[in-house]
Amino acid sequence: MKRLVLALTLMLVIALAGLLFVTTQVNRFMSTPLQVPSEGVEFDIPSGSSFALVSSNLVSGGLISTDRWLRLYVRWQGTGGAIHAGDYFIEPGATPKSLLDKFTSGAVRLYDFTIVEGWNFREVLLALHSNDALKATMTNEDWPALLESLGAQMTHPEGLFLPETYRFARGTTDRELLGQAYALMQKVLTEEWDDRSSDAPVQSPYETLILASIVEKETARADERPKIAGVFARRLGKRMRLQTDPTVIYGIGPAFDGNLTRKHLTTDTPYNTYTRHGLPPTPIAMPGRAAINAALHPEEGSELFFVATGLDDGSHKFSSTKAEHDAAVQEYLARLRKKRRAGN
């Protein structure tokens, strides 16, 4: 009897010692930094992957020398089925424990895509399709269907997507990202419209986008946006034509070769603000929040004209009379000729 008790006790001690050894090894392994290069490494988990495949790929990728302890830990924790497929970025200093937490929480790598202020809808789609992490699913013919799916009342996409930097997971579609940009534009436009000035020269949020897009195309300078909006507000109030080149260029479309001629200015299109009064029928670009704010808070003053100065700072000369404006135009042309001579 004593021998049986002694034998059982010895077996229990051995079992406990073995369990302690295994537990110690597993804990040490799970807290030891992975073999990650200093620049980090990308790791992809394809959809439908088993944890056995994931752990095997970690070994074949040189991140761990063996997956024995990792698979044992996962079996204890019961988390093998909670792995999320996706594209992950593993940073230096990551441990098997932190990596497993990343996999089970679905903390996939996020990429950036920026819609630039002043881009038109064709440029937006081209940039989307140039991003390798995004999935292209639409063409320029698909814009009306996209807008309908987003609940938009407009059928023309111009101006409806907010210039901003968006973060997304690999495999996100162009439609999904555009959906984010549309929703954010609606949010920003509503906020700005609700806070508009009493002398704002527009009658609706959509007119705001139209005017803001013109302001956006006329200047990249933050200090000039309210001034240019003020010029347009006064011209609209006096029933003067806006006479802004960017609208003419937009009306020409993709055929525009970069050389705006007198014939362009006198050829009537729905977007030619030299031949037509008021705002064009749609925005001509994607306006940022600052341009939207400027359109709804135009700067007071008497100026009715502006022209580029030709200086490297991108500034404009504002004038109250046609005579002052004509002089500013001649000053700009003289500066332009001087630059050309210096370039030769």
Image (cartoon, grey):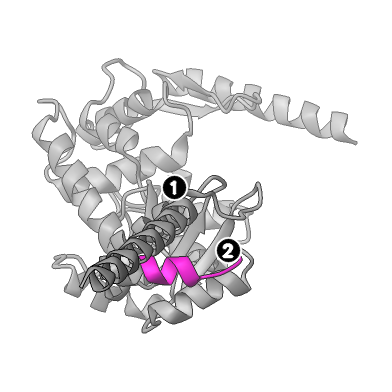
- Residue at image x 47%, y 51%? 28
Residue 25 placement, left or right of 73: right
Name which residue type carries label 2.
Answer: Ile
Camera-side mark, 1 or 2 = 2
Residue 244 placement, left or right of 7: right
237 to 38, vertically: above or below? above
Report x, y in % for residue 84.
33, 70
Indicate which disc, 1 or 2, sits on the residue closer to the N terminus: 2
135 to 258, vertically: above or below? below
Q: Which mark is residue 118?
A: 1
Name which residue type carries label 1.
Answer: Gly
210 to 302, vertically: above or below? below
Residue 279 placement, left or right of 55: left
* Mark 2 surroundings within 10 Å by alpha-carbon count, few (fewer than 14), some (14 through 19), many (20 or more): many
Q: Are marks 1 and 2 in contact (CB under 8 Å)?
A: no
Q: The N terminus lies in which quarter of the figure?
A: bottom left
Q: Secondary structure at mark 2?
A: loop
Our reading of the magenta stretch's main secondary structure is helix
- Residue at image x 40%, y 52%? 98
Q: Is residue 270 magenta?
A: no
**Extreme-top residue of the structure:** 301
The span from disc 1 to disc 2 (Cα, nearest Å) is 48 Å
Q: Which residues are magenta?
A: 64-73
Q: Secondary structure at mark 1?
A: loop
Is residue 156 visible in this depiction of the protein?
A: no
**Label 2, on which residue?**
64
234 to 211, vertically: above or below? above
Seen from the viewer's position, the closer of residues 292 and 183 is 183
- Residue at image x 54%, y 45%? 93
- Residue at image x 28%, y 64%? 9
Report x, y in % for residue 124.
44, 61
